[in-house]
Image (spheres, grey):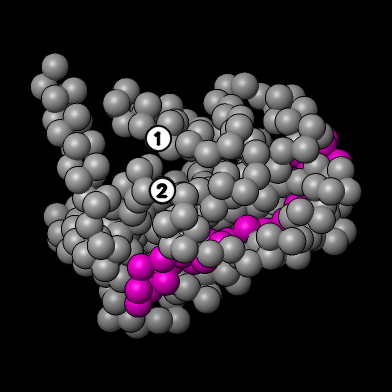
């Protein structure tokens, strides 16, 4: 009962926050991020470890600045969800701009199944909102332990249009069927899901357990892969979703090579905004046999 009460209080506070001007929300989120950086010892340690492994050429001070900037933007992204859940469409259209929409429309008009490959940058939810305001898509969700927030997140992902949400237990057949029916699949394959369906391929020169789903799904559905990256504006409120060019020669017969290509793309995107990747995730948790734990 106490947990439900505090959860409902948190939702009410988020609802109140969505009435604030965007600059005020950004400032408040930045402050919350600074508090999380100081008090969230475990996630700060994970972030520092990830940055040390991925950017050994940078000094400790440089990596610390990236880490602090990451938490500041993380705080902003958390509060911005209130805008996505309750602000009207016209407002959100001005908050989240989109580039390359015509590329996706052209593929859909041609009747091609499409996978929108979306790496875990902090603007991921904003990108999803921009898409569901324009397209009926299919996406995968994980149930949250907190039922109140679980319901809120699910409702937010279905707020616009006719969206199709699948759990991770639904398998790939329903996903393929939805893509073939004209729904682009908003796919997030760059987290450590353990050894199952994964191969160890380089990510910043570190052998990293990476699921092979992008290659396997593209082959099974006959789908075109389109990179989809959302950037937060670091100096002002707002986001930009960038839909890239469709990938040529993908998938190939070599699933491991396809997965390396995916990781290389993410590395290149991170280089343009290193503070915006989801560094609080234990990306290197699963290790090759015989290697020591990293975290």
Does residue 181 appear to the left or right of 190 in the view shown?
right
| Nearest the eye: 69 or 178 | 178
**Residue 239 falls within the magenta-colored stretch:** yes
Quadrant housing residue 243: bottom right
Helix, strand or loop at mark 1: helix
| Picture coordinates of residue 287, whole percent (x, y) | 51, 47
Does residue 34 appear to the left or right of 207 in the view shown?
left
Q: Residue at x 56, y 47 (%)?
A: 133
Instruction: Using the image, determine if residue 275 lies above or below residue 74.
Output: below
**Residue 99 falls within the magenta-colored stretch:** no
Q: Is there any visible trace of residue 16 in the rendered image?
A: yes
| Picture coordinates of residue 236, whole percent (x, y) | 35, 73
CA separation, marks 2 and 1? 17 Å
| Picture coordinates of residue 250, whole percent (x, y) | 83, 54
Helix, strand or loop at mark 2: loop
Instruction: Using the image, determine if residue 124 lies above or below residue 229.
Output: above
Which residue in the structure is indicated by mark 1? 153
Quadrant housing residue 238: bottom left
Does residue 61 appear to the left or right of 119 in the view shown?
left
């Amino acid at each position: 009962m106490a947990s439900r009460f505090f959860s409902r209080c948190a939702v009410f506070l988020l609802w109140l926050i969505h009435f604030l001007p965007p600059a005020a929300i950004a400032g408040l989120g930045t402050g919350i991020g600074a508090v999380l950086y100081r008090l969230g010892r475990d996630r700060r340690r994970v972030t520092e470890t990830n940055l040390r492994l991925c950017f050994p050429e940078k000094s400790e001070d440089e990596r610390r600045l990236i880490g602090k900037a990451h938490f500041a933007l993380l705080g902003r992204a958390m509060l911005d969800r209130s805008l996505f859940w309750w602000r009207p469409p016209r407002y959100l259209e001005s908050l989240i701009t989109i580039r390359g929409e015509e590329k996706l429309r052209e593929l859909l008009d041609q009747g091609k199944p499409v996978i929108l490959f979306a790496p875990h940058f902090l603007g991921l939810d904003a990108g999803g909102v921009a898409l569901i305001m324009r397209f009926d898509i299919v996406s995968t969700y994980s149930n949250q332990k907190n039922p109140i927030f679980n319901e809120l997140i699910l409702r937010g992902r279905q707020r616009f249009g006719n969206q199709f949400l699948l759990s991770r237990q639904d398998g790939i057949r329903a996903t393929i069927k939805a893509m073939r029916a004209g729904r682009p699949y908003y796919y997030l394959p760059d987290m450590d899901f353990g050894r199952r369906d994964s191969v160890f391929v380089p990510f910043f020169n570190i052998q990293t357990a990476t699921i092979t789903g992008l290659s396997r799904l593209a082959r099974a559905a006959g789908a075109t892969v389109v990179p989809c990256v959302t950037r937060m504006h670091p100096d002002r409120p707002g986001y930009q979703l960038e839909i890239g060019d469709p990938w040529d020669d993908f998938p190939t017969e070599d699933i491991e090579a396809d997965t390396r290509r995916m990781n290389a793309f993410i590395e290149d995107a991170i280089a343009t905004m290193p503070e915006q990747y989801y560094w609080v995730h234990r990306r290197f948790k699963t290790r090759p046999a015989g290697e020591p734990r990293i975290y």
